[in-house]
Image: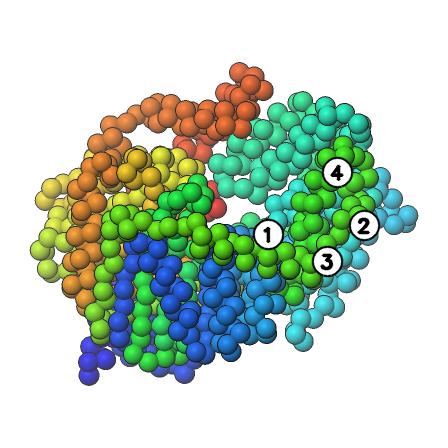
Amino acid sequence: MKKMVQIASVCLSLSLLSGCQLLNVKQSSLILSDPAGEVSPLVIDSGTVITDNQQAFEEKLALINQATKSIELAYFIFSDDYSSSVLASHLIAASQRGVKVRLLVDYVTNYSRLDWFSMLEAEGGGDLSVRFYGRPTQNMIKDAVYMTLGCNDSAPRADKKACSKEKLAKIERIFQTERIEGVSAESLNISNINMAESGLFLSGFYGKNTDAMTLAIEQGQNVSIDHLSVIGSKENLIQVKQFKHFGKTYWKSRTGPAYQRVFNRIKTALAFKHYGDALNPVYASFSQFLPIERQNIDEAARDWDFFTDYTHHKLLLVDNQSFMLGGRNIEDAYHMHPNSLSAKYTFMDTDLTIHLSEPSRKMQHHFETLWSFVRTASLSEVREHAPNDFIANWYWANDACLEAFQLKGCRTDWLKRVNLSLETRIDLEKTKLKENQETYQAEYQPSSTFANNFPSFSVAPMAIATYLENLPYGTNDQQRQFGTTYNQALRSNKNIHAYWLSKLKEQCSTEDKSPREVYFYNAYFFPPPNMILAFKALVDGSNDCRHVTLNIMTNSVDTTDLVPVNILASHSLKAFADFYTAQFNKNRSATIRYFEYQKTEEQPLSLHSKVTLFNDALVIGSANLDVRSYFMDTNNALVIEDDKALINQYKQYLDARINNTDVLKLKNVELSSKTFETMVANDRALLQASLEKYAVQNRLSETQHQTLIQKMEELTTAAYQLTKRLLESDSSLEQQRISDQFHQLFKTI
């Protein structure tokens, strides 16, 4: 009976959005269900909410060391730095004692460390396996082949139409016969084919190495840009370096986030002004990225548009009974206090450790489903379709070429001169692992003073826990989905956002009108349209929400590691602040308070937590309150209900931060009073700082400078205008059109 009451409690919080019923719980993926259809919440034995980096790291190591059967991990970033090397060594030790270790990491984010993960597998002795999530689709690999495939004499290069027709026919003929594990690769839209120089091109693409992409085009199409360099002078060496910088800039202008694309398109135009004809051969090749003659051009373009659908999960699951999740990646910035070994940022984050009363088939099933999704690839598959030999060796070859000022021919024959085998490179990674461990143990000292500012909180036994995921596939067929269906977060399998939306609606609809506070403690606050509309409903008087206070706590430009998010979000927030000021009714509207962290000597940190607190629930996970986390990435979170002590303690923790005005600044008045002209001036100052940082401003004419400002204003104005129109519209059809525009413009931010 108690279990049915618990299920009803979770179901009630979803009923406003999903129509959840006890007799038809399979309609909702928010309640854990295993393959057999058994439905129940997780039964907690004990748990801890962790805000201190060092404690989070030690807890991860403890979980790994206690494993007896299995360790499952899924992470957006798994680095090869100091603390990460220590954690990796513990995973290796676990596998060597017979524990089955499976590690899933994001392809785009971690490809450059391919040899590192091969080393982990090798050291694991067969019980440690790594997969990359987000492999290139077959369409993408076909395009890479097209770019790097030359034409035969029957279709000379000068006859572009005949050449293209010949290449497309050859590509289709070869790809249609490929099978992977007995299944047609074409039906899965994946491939392991490496044809012409497609593997080299993709290696450069994912490894962010423009030299590799350029070489792939040169060798594959038998073209050359060696005339760029007249060997023998430092001046010409500088010219080649500048050309390489152009390649990187150009690629960012085509594939980077919206802000980067605007900035780098201007820099690209500037490069053409200075280098002119010398850049045209590579520009022409890059511009032919998607052959317009191919039959499924729209499908291919979509694949490229969504190639940065990341796995943003953070999960460590041990023996299917203990797990840890939250906001922390595997990297020094998340697992260290500020110290001499730290990188630029030290993050404030929140993780959650849970020990269940018994092993959970449901948790294991969720990991298994993600692990076996069609977009994941084993390391051996990655080495088939995107071998990394060139970029892995490039460091040594590049040094040799530059030191000797011998660039001509160096591109094409360096593999013959400096070619470290995979076995040798794995040995080098093993040495790095050992050296990093020794450095960590000898030089890193955690700070007790720092740790005292970041407490931990106990989770009560028998608290109700529900595991949520945002996934790019259906719960039953695992068919890949792109983006979301408007106003259908739950059916689109965006379960974290569906829960947020249902809980926000619940705040006003409940008969209990006693004061209640909601907290969004989130690193990157750039809400997608459905969340903006949920905030609108708290304010516009359509519901009696006067007893509700919404507290938003996030980074400022001075504390964030992603300035473009703050720049664009500020204009969207300005639109909402204007709406809030105009619509606020003390007898109907919720109070909304927006806070930003301030950078101080005592607080030189960047917020990375993703925590939501309601009066009866605490949500900790990996999802940011931004467009990307809703529309693009996988994410996971845990909802804890029926634990009043934990909720009250965490509320006191957040309130203490809010009350420290040196750390958190209330921005409501500033947002509502700031004019568009003032915001533009601030944006210009930030842009100017970027130009000075990259020494670009001296090469911009006044016209070019103004064009850059104009392009930037187009994006920020769009953020403001789309948000304003969304808030003003009462038409579902119009809101859908605006939402689609918003998602397409800002989904990669």
Which quadrant of the figure has residue 316? bottom left
**Disc 4 marks which residue?**
401
The Cα–Cα distance between marks 1 and 2, rounded to whole angstroms, is 22 Å
Q: What kind of residue is marked 4?
A: Cys
Q: In which quarter of the image is residue 317?
A: bottom left
Q: Can residue 690 be seen in this view?
A: yes
Query: Is disc 3 placed on a helix, strand or loop?
Result: loop
Q: How far apart are marks 3 and 2 (CA)?
A: 12 Å
Measuring from the top left, give residue 79's x and y in whole percent.
50, 54
Which residue lies under the disc numbered 1? Answer: 112
| Residue 727 horizontal/vertical position (percent) | 30, 42
Q: Position of residue 637 (x, y in %)?
A: 35, 62
Quick check: 719 left or right of 619? right
Q: Distance between the residues labelled 1 and 3?
A: 16 Å
Asked which secondary structure carries label 4, the reply is: helix
User: Residue 246, how many percent across, how many down?
Assistant: 64, 33
Name the amino acid, label 2: Lys
N-terminal of the two: label 3 or label 2? 2
* Three-letter amino acid code of the residue under disc 3: Ser
Q: Which residue is drawn at 24% across and 39% down?
A: 664
Marks 1 and 2: which is nearer the front?
2
Q: In which quarter of the image is the N terminus?
A: bottom left
Return the residue nearer the eye: 346 or 434.
434
